[in-house]
Amino acid sequence: MNIPFKRFLGIGGVLAGIGATIWALRDRLLPAPQVPEGPPPRFRTATGAAAPVPAGSDDLTDIKGIGPVYAGRLADAGVTTFAELAGADASTLAERIDVPEPSVADWIEQAAKRT
């Protein structure tokens, strides 16, 4: 081996040692991350919180694909029972509650089986 290559290895070894030392002491060298205070952030939905479903109506969340938010949107549109959902027009209702039409058509089919 020639001398410049040995120097290169020596310098590389020193740099590797410095890097290993910094890595080992990183917890002491870097500040601890700040933990935010207060309640955790809430997930946003298109309409906010789910609207309360009126008494005397069916539980539309029993239909696959309808959760509390979609049930609230349906209630806002005047659909609170399986019979009302089964008799609705898919394209009109989809536009009123801002949901894709194929999903609403599937809900209508499921509601028709429950009436």
Image (cartoon, rainbow, N blue to C red):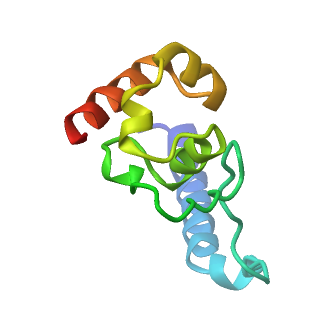
In this view, the residue farthest toward the top is 91
Q: Which residue is located at x 67 percent, y 59 percent? A: 49
Up the image or down, 2 lies above or below 42; here it is: above
**Which image quadrant: the C terminus?**
top left
Q: Which residue is located at x 64 percent, y 72 percent? A: 22
> Residue 6's x, y, as percent?
50, 47
> Residue 80's x, y, as percent?
50, 47
**Which image quadrant: the N terminus?**
top left
- Residue 35 figure quarter: bottom right
**Residue 23 or 109: which is nearer the viewer?**
109
**Residue 106 or 113: which is nearer the viewer?**
113
> Residue 50's x, y, as percent?
62, 57
**Residue 98 or 11: which is nearer the viewer?**
98
In this view, the residue farthest toward the left is 113
> Residue 111's x, y, as percent?
30, 36
Q: Which residue is located at x 54 percent, y 42 percent? A: 3
Up the image or down, 53 lies above or below 77; here it is: below
Q: Is residue 65 left or right of residue 91?
A: left
- Residue 32 figure quarter: bottom right
Q: Is residue 61 left or right of residue 68?
A: left
Q: Which residue is located at x 68 percent, y 64 percent? A: 42
